[in-house]
Every structure is written in C-alpha cells, then in structure tokens.
Image: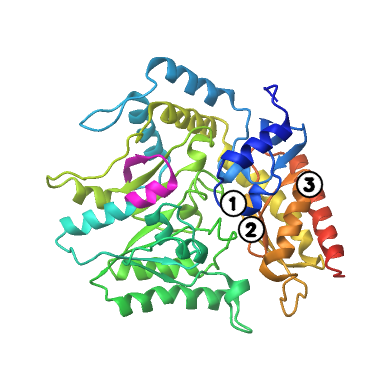
C-alpha cells in the first residue's frame, strides 16, 4: 500500500462512507470487501498483498493490462499542456480532433464521424437523441420507438437502463415508455425441447419482425443490441441470428445500433463485434477499452447515412456533456489505439490467444457441474448445473455460481458471476501461461463447488 493506513481502517472507512455500484448496501455495511492497491501486467493486488489474475480485464476494459506506461505518460503530458476545456460553442482540442480521426480509421466502412461522451451509458443516451433527431429531420417524427432485448445491458442511467432489459434495474427505475423488448438469443436457457441452435436463432430473430408489426413499422425507429451480450452472461448468438436481424432492419427502415462497449477493440477477434458477425450498423456505441480503462471516455460512431441527414440542414443538436472529448481522456485513447495498431494486438489475440483460451475452456465441458461452455474470441461463459440432462441448477438465486466465483477469487482468480454462469474476459495481452493459471484456479473452484453441493 502507498499509505500508512492499514487495511482494516480502510475497510471501515469504506463501509462507513462509500456507496458502491450494484451492491447490496445493507450486506456490504455489515460485511467485508477488498481494497485493491496496485496492479502490474495482468495481475491486481489487494491491500494485504494478495495477487489475482484479472480474468475480467477490470470491467471488460483493461485489454492491455495495467502496465502501459505510454498511456499514463500521454495523460500526464496532456495535463501539463491543457488539462481541460470544453467542446461546446464551436470549440475543440487537439487530442479530441485526432482521436476522432483515429477512431474512424479503425471503424467499419461508412463511419466518418464521432460524438464523444464520458461512458457507454451516456453514449447510449446519445444514440436515442441521434435516432430521434434523424427521423425528425426526415419528416418522420412518429418514428420514436426503440426495440431492445430482455436481459440486455446498455448502461445504468435512466435512459440506458430503459434500453437494457434487466428486470432488477427496471424495478428500481422508471422506464422510458418508447422502449420495448424481445427475447435474447440464449439457446441454453430459452430453446424449446429438441430445438437446434440454428432454428432457435431464426425463431428468436423473427421476434423483432413480430414486434415491429405489433407496434407499427411507421412508429419503430431502431433496434439496439450488443453483438455478444456481455454483462448479460456472454450470450453467444447462433450463426443464423444476426443475418436474419440484419435482413429485418434493412427491409423495415429500422436503424441498427451496435452496442460495442464490451465487444469493441478486439474482444471478439476483430476490431468490432459487428465485423465478426457481419452486421451493418448505423450507430456504434464504444467506451471501456478505448482508453484501456485508464481514463473515462465513451462515444458513438455515427454512420455517413445518418450524418448526411444530420448535417444537411440547420438547427442545433441540443445535447452535450461538460467533459465530452476531454483532452486527457482523448490523449489516453490516442495512446491506446497506437499500441493496439503498432503491436498488432487485435490480430495476435485472435490468432494465438483466443484459440488457446477457447480450446482450454472446452476441456471443462465434461466436468460434473458444467452444463455448457460458450465463447467467442477472448471472452467466455460456463453455465453451472446440478444435472446436465435436466439442466437443474445447483442452488436457488444463482447460489452455486456465487459460491464458485467467491472460491475462484479466494484462490487468486478474478472472474465474475452472472446468473448461473461464470463469465470471464482476460486481457488481450495474456500469454498461454496466464491461461494455464486461469484454468488451474477455475478448475479448482469448480471442483470445490461440486464437492460443496455434493455433485459427482
């Protein structure tokens, strides 16, 4: 620790004053957490010196790990020159200008403009504003409805949480009445008996068509989805799913929003998840890995199809944020993109790391409590069950996965639990030895969980 304050005192202060995100305040106030004090490479260390392999890349964002001095130096240098100025009122700054250009250079074809925000949540709020403005300018003000998916995560502001489809969030927030939801492409959870993945993918995709018919095509503006649902449990769509959704959006004059906050910058094997799945989005949400998590930054890549309309006539786009295009955050983004490009991080991860990672995880499919192993690129999920045939779960309220997660954490592996699944997204700079370490700790956690629940 870089302080004379001991761990017990820090934890007491934390419980007394710090309200954590996505946390049971009552339980945490009477429980025990972790204080992280430093990180190096792909390992994080708590205030007692215990090291953990970060199998989640922070929150899906530290794709390059924690020791990228080039990014840190870029932020420091920018703070010396111009620590802040806003981008309102026809103003800009050099890092914002240069990062916008760099982002369009790695974007799919047809994206030449960027709107900066501070986070993915705010970027998805921005998408709503852009979509409504676009159709207003086209003389179609009735097109206001947006369709999303159940169990989707698109952020935590009121608007972004409304776009998402997580029940717990909807119960605690007033949802926007112009957002509607269809089922997610989760074959393991939602397939009918005997239904194969390809048939399931087509059936679930066609729910979008049915929803459009129900609401009225003249009123539906956009469909938003992650190429792969990350926080929802690393839901890998069947191969038939995205081509069918793309057909529906194209035929029905529906804008497609690809939320790439997690999938972007190499996680699925290409720069963008939409490229991995052959999508043709009109808007791309980004955040997280754009600065390797070192500084807050998000934004929207806006297609030329939309900017041609948005820029064709006058009138202010009445939306913005104090820190949009913050110079220090954009400096971090420039350094991050430079590393990704110069070191061929995305390509090397796809060619060397991802196949090894997925092959090793596949060896767990015969474990007595593993019902499914699924993954794409450098992230994956393992569904936990008591019985493989019936898919009965280990315990109520996802208790088995929570036990497995806690065990893995205590063994020195940071992974997460979502529902009854263990999810992981290791940094793209991991070596095979890091994956071996991950497998060792994860297998030990699975074994301990099976023993605890008396399975096998």
Q: Where does residue 287 sit, x and y in percent of width and height?
A: 46, 43
**Which image quarter: residue 339?**
top right
Please determine whether, in this image, residue 302 is positioned above or below residue 362.
above
Q: Is residue 183 magenta?
A: no
Left or right of 43, for residue 192: left
Left or right of 340, for residue 109: left
Please determine whether, in this image, residue 35 is positioned above or below residue 70.
below
Q: Where does residue 65 sit, x and y in percent of width and height?
A: 63, 35
Where disc 1 sits, the SS reads helix
Q: Where does residue 335 sit, x and y in percent of width and height?
A: 49, 28
Q: Residues within 10 Å of mark 1 (few under 14, many from 20)?
A: some
**Which image quarter: residue 62?**
top right
Q: Where does residue 253 sit, x and y in percent of width and height?
A: 27, 66
In percent of the image, x 87 and y 70: which residue is there?
Answer: 456
Q: Is residue 124 magenta?
A: yes
Left or right of 383, for residue 264: left
Q: Report if residue 436 is visible in the image.
A: no
- Of residues 387 and 354, the one nearer the viewer is 387
| Residue farthest to the bottom, as pictured | 193
The disc placed on residue 375 is: 2
- Residue corresponding to mark 1: 25
Where disc 2 sits, the SS reads strand
The disc placed on residue 410 is: 3
In percent of the image, x 63 and y 28: which residue is there?
Answer: 67
The disc placed on residue 450 is: none
**What is the distance, in whole Å, between disc 1 and disc 3 at their CAs?**
22 Å
Where disc 3 sits, the SS reads helix
Q: Write the start and end of the magenta stretch as one range.
A: 110-126
**What is the distance, in whole Å, between disc 2 and disc 1 at their CAs?**
33 Å
Lower position in the chain sequence, tag 3 or tag 2: 2
């Amino acid at each position: 620790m870089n302080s004379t304050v001991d761990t017990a005192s820090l934890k007491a202060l934390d419980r007394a004053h710090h309200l954590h995100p996505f946390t049971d305040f009552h339980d945490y106030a009477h429980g025990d957490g972790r204080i992280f004090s430093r990180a190096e490479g792909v390992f994080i260390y708590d205030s007692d010196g215990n090291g953990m392999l970060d199998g989640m890349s922070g929150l899906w964002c530290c794709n390059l790990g924690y020791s990228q001095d080039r990014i840190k130096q870029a932020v420091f240098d920018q703070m010396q020159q111009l620590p802040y100025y806003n981008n309102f009122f026809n103003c800009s700054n050099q890092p914002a200008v240069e990062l916008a250009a760099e982002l369009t250079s790695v974007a799919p074809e047809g994206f030449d403009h960027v709107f900066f925000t501070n986070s993915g949540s705010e970027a998805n709020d921005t998408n709503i504003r852009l979509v409504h403005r676009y159709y207003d300018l086209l003389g179609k003000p009735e097109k206001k409805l947006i369709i999303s998916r159940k169990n989707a995560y698109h952020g935590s502001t009121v608007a972004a949480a409304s776009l998402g489809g997580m029940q717990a969030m909807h119960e605690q927030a007033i949802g926007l009445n112009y957002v509607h939801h269809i089922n997610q492409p989760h074959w393991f959870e939602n397939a009918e008996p005997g239904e194969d993945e390809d048939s399931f993918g087509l059936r679930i995709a066609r729910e979008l068509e049915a929803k459009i018919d129900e609401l009225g095509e003249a009123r539906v503006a956009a469909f938003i989805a992650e190429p792969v649902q990350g926080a929802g449990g690393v839901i890998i769509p069947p191969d038939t799913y995205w081509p069918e959704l793309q057909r529906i959006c194209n035929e029905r004059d529906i804008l497609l929003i690809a939320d790439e906050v997690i999938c972007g910058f190499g996680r699925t094997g290409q720069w963008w998840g939409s490229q991995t799945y052959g999508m043709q989005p009109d808007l791309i949400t980004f955040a997280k890995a754009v600065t390797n998590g070192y500084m807050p930054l998000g934004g929207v890549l806006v297609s030329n199809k939309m900017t041609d309309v948005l820029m064709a006539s006058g009138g202010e786009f009445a939306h913005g944020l104090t820190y949009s295009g913050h110079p220090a955050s954009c400096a971090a983004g420039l350094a991050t993109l430079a590393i990704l490009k110069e070191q061929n991080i995305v390509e090397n991860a796809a060619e060397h790391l991802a196949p090894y990672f997925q092959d090793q995880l596949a060896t767990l499919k015969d474990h007595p409590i593993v019902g499914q192993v699924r993954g794409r690129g450098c992230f994956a999920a393992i569904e936990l069950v008591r019985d493989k045939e019936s898919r009965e779960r280990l315990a109520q309220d996802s208790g088995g996965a929570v036990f497995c997660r806690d065990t893995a954490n205590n063994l020195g592996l940071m992974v997460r639990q979502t529902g009854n699944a263990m999810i992981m997204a290791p940094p793209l700079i991991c070596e095979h030895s890091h994956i071996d370490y991950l497998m060792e700790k994860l297998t030990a956690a699975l074994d301990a969980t099976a023993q605890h629940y008396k399975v096998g």
